[in-house]
Image: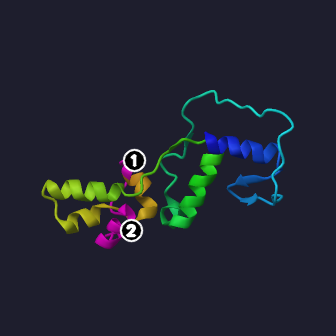
Amino acid sequence: MLLAGLHTYLRRTAHASVSWTGEQLNLPRTLPAPSAEITETANVPHRFAFNDTNEGYTGAYRDWDTWQYELDVLAVHGVNRVLVYIGADAVYYDTFRQFGYTDAEMRAWIPAPAHQPWWLLQNMSGFGGPVSRQLIERRAA
């Protein structure tokens, strides 16, 4: 919650902000002191972001820089629980291979990344595949 406190200070005192659409961080060389104590409390201990389909569509192809910015914005807004499925395909692949499924069977069953949320919800398989082993490994890295 330390970052959420920083963001509260930035918004209330320094008139700056960080958001999903960009940031306004034109800060003076010496940051202003708050005119009074700044306090905020959360009414719940867990502040959750995303849902089962968040990584679908184009979200499946975010690069690290995009993810890093997303995580930073979530943190300054007080989010402390994030649902992330990237890499689940590798867990399924490795587990089912241990049970005797072939590489070809697994890669044909696992859909392309943009459709994996619906696969994980058990209502789709193999769409846009077969996926490459390199793609599975890259998403798990």
Q: Nearer the viewer, residue 141 or 133?
A: 141
**Crowdedness of circle 1 by 10 Å Cα count: few (<14), some, many (20+)?**
few
Q: Earlier in the sequence, mark 2 or mark 1?
A: 1
Q: Is residue 128 left or right of residue 13?
A: left
User: Residue placed farthest to the top in the image?
Assistant: 43
Question: Quick check: is 94 in the magenta stretch?
Answer: no
Residues under numbered marks 2 and 1 in contact, where contact means CB atoms less than 8 Å apart: no
Residue visible at 41% across and 57% down?
86
Amino acid of disc 2: Gly
* Residue 111 lies in quadrant: bottom left
Question: Circle 1 sits on which residue?
Answer: 121
Q: Is residue 129 left or right of residue 54?
A: left
Amino acid of disc 1: Leu
Secondary structure beneath disc 2? Answer: loop
Question: Quick check: is 122 in the magenta stretch?
Answer: yes
Q: Nearer the viewer, residue 37 or 100?
A: 37
User: Residue placed farthest to the front in the image?
Assistant: 30
Mark 2–mark 1 Cα distance, whole angstroms, equals: 17 Å
Residue visible at 82% across and 55% down?
30
Residue 60, percent from left and from top: 48, 62
User: Residue placed farthest to the left in the image?
Assistant: 100
User: Is residue 121 at least partly visible in the picture?
Assistant: yes
Give the quarter of the figure containing the N terminus: top right
Q: Is residue 58 left or right of residue 29?
A: left
Q: Which residues are magenta?
A: 120-141
Question: Circle 2 sits on which residue?
Answer: 128
Residue 35 versus residue 23 in the image, above or below: above
Secondary structure beneath disc 1? Answer: loop
Q: How many marks?
A: 2
